């Protein structure tokens, strides 16, 4: 049972890597897999906060690498779902504390026990990103439909391709269908046109995510909102299933439908 | 005993170092060893490195150059088959020739003096943000040039795809230099000394191929349809 290592990265900060890692890990675990999420953002850790496990941290990734503890001691078991574990980052160190070789070694050990190893990459293109990308069998690139995020994602994809980790799959996060319809936001095809890699998921902008993140509960545990469904669909596609994309058209009122009818749409 | 992965010999074009497949560290070590052995014979010379199919980036090529430099040799060319290796060599300003052209025994003097506009670098992939291509000659890209990608060419640039990045054409030969693309929407466009950017009203209904060139010191773009 050789586990698969999936790294979630983006280039740009704040586009939803950590939220995606938390929710995909949870969705894969609910589906019966044994999953470990690793926070590779040494010094600015927040995967533990988003998963609501911060007050259970005793040892972290740097402790494992430096031999302060055994790998098993750093694994935090999530009590809400069977098979979900977290290895948190260190908060008092920085990214120079870990090397790509260290990450590969840790993941090689974890592969023997877990079906999936999800690595939450930090933003940027430097050491942290290189650490997170080194052990990856597969990479998911998260972007929002904004020009600056797409620019950074393109850079990251170029670096991944040059390192032989490409091309990766794309997740477009925080899509607002109403803005797309007004022409105020890039639509899915605009983004895919530039990045030219296969899309694996589109997640709508959802207030529920902010609310549940602040509570330390991955949104898929809380409800069955569109964003929850989108995360679950991505986890199924990771398993190879062909799941149709959700229809993210905004709700239209009767009046809007009438106007559309008169305009011949 | 580890098999020979590095061979050095003199040819009519000068010294050629051929490196084969295998572990990169081993290769650098063998190269240093070989140069040690025949140090006095090689000193002060120029060397070309033939890498075959191996993919090398600029850091790796620089590492090769450093090993050669430690033995007072200057690396002036990298002969390789892979597009990535070619691009990396160009970025470092090294002469490049595909491995099979070596057999034509072109002398280094002739290669260096060949007019820049005679050679064309063809790149068959999309250039992503942060990737650069630099050449004294002309460039043809079969793919897109994304925003953040940069092409610097001595001659013309033809993009069989969408130009959304930055192009500096005519750096060596500005007369007759032009930039052509299936969609001309550059971040910045420089031909010779003239500079331009895509017009702000870029909500175009249809995408048309265009060619940009300099007229009276200004860059103008014309749609590519014969009237």
Image (cartoon, helix red, strand yellow):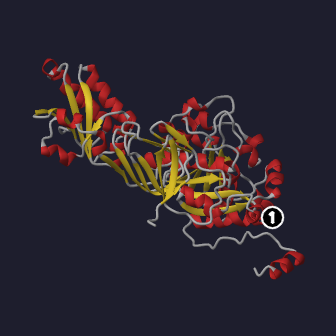
Q: Residue A251 in the image: x percent, y percent? A: 82, 71
Query: Which residue is the extreme one toward the top?
Result: B40
Say whether residue B32 is left or right of residue A254.
Answer: left
Residue A3 screen position, x and y as percent: 51, 56
Q: Nearer the viewer, residue B202 or A105?
A: B202
Whether residue B175 sits left or right of residue B112 in the image: it is right
Left or right: A93 as drawn, with respect to B138: right
**What is the chain letter for disc 1?**
A
Of residues B109 and A243, the one nearer the viewer is B109
Residue B217 sits above or below residue B227 on the image: above
Query: In terms of depth relative to the viewer, which is nearer, B201 or B98?
Result: B201
Q: Residue furthest front?
A: B216
Please say whether residue A108 is visible from this viewpoint. no
> Does residue B121 sit above or below A219 in this rendering?
above
Residue A255 on image: x %, y %? 89, 76
Is residue B172 something one can see in this rendering? yes
Q: Split into 4 quadrants, where in the image is the C terminus of chain A? A: bottom right
Residue at point 14% right, 34% down?
Answer: B13
Where does label 1 land, which residue? A223
SS at circle 1: loop
Which of the 4 image quarters holds residue B64? top left
Residue lying at 60% horizontally and 47% vertically, measured from the top left: A151
């Amino acid at each position: 049972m050789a586990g698969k290592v999936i790294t979630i990265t983006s280039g740009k900060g704040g586009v939803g890597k950590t939220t995606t890692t938390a929710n995909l890990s949870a969705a894969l675990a609910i589906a019966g897999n044994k999953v470990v999420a690793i926070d590779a953002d040494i010094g600015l850790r927040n995967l533990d906060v988003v998963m609501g496990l911060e007050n259970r941290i005793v040892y972290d990734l740097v402790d494992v690498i430096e031999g302060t503890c055994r790998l098993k001691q750093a694994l935090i078991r999530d009590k809400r779902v069977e098979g979900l574990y977290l290895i948190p980052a260190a908060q008092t160190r920085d990214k120079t504390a870990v090397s790509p070789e260290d990450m590969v070694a840790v993941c090689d050990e974890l592969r023997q026990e877990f079906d999936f190893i999800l690595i939450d990459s930090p933003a940027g293109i430097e050491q942290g990103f290189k650490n997170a990308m080194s052990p990856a069998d597969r990479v998911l690139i998260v972007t929002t439909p904004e020009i600056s995020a797409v620019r950074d994602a393109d850079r990251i994809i170029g670096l991944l391709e040059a390192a032989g980790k490409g091309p990766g799959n794309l997740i477009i996060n925080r899509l607002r269908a109403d803005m797309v319809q007004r022409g105020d936001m890039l639509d899915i095809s605009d983004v895919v046109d530039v990045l030219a890699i296969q899309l694996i998921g589109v997640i709508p902008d959802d207030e529920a995510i902010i609310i549940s993140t602040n509570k330390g509960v991955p949104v898929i545990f809380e409800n069955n909102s569109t964003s929850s469904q989108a995360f679950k669909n991505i986890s199924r596609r990771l398993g190879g299933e062909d799941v149709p994309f959700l229809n993210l058209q905004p709700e239209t009122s009767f009046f809007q439908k009438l106007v559309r009818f008169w305009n011949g749409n | 005993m580890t098999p020979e992965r590095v061979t050095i010999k003199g040819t009519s074009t000068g010294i050629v170092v051929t490196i084969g497949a295998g572990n990169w560290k081993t290769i650098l070590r063998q190269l240093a060893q070989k140069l040690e052995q025949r140090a006095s014979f090689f000193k002060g010379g120029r060397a070309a490195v033939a890498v075959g199919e191996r993919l090398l980036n600029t850091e790796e090529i620089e590492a090769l150059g450093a090993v050669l430099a430690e033995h007072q040799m200057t690396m002036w060319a990298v002969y390789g088959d892979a597009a990535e290796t070619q691009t990396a060599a160009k970025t470092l300003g090294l002469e490049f020739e595909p491995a099979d052209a070596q057999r034509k025994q072109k002398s280094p003097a002739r290669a260096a003096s060949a007019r820049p506009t005679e050679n064309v670098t063809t790149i068959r992939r999309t250039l992503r943000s942060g990737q650069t291509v630099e050449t004294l000659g002309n460039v043809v890209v079969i793919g897109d040039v994304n925003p953040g990608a940069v092409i610097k060419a001595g001659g013309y640039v033809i993009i069989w795809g969408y130009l959304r990045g930055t192009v500096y054409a005519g750096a060596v030969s500005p007369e007759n230099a032009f930039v052509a693309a299936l969609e001309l929407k550059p971040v910045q466009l420089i031909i010779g000394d003239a500079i331009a950017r895509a017009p702000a009203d870029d909500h175009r209904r249809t995408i048309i191929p265009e060619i940009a060139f300099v007229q009276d010191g200004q860059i103008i773009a014309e749609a590519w349809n014969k009237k």
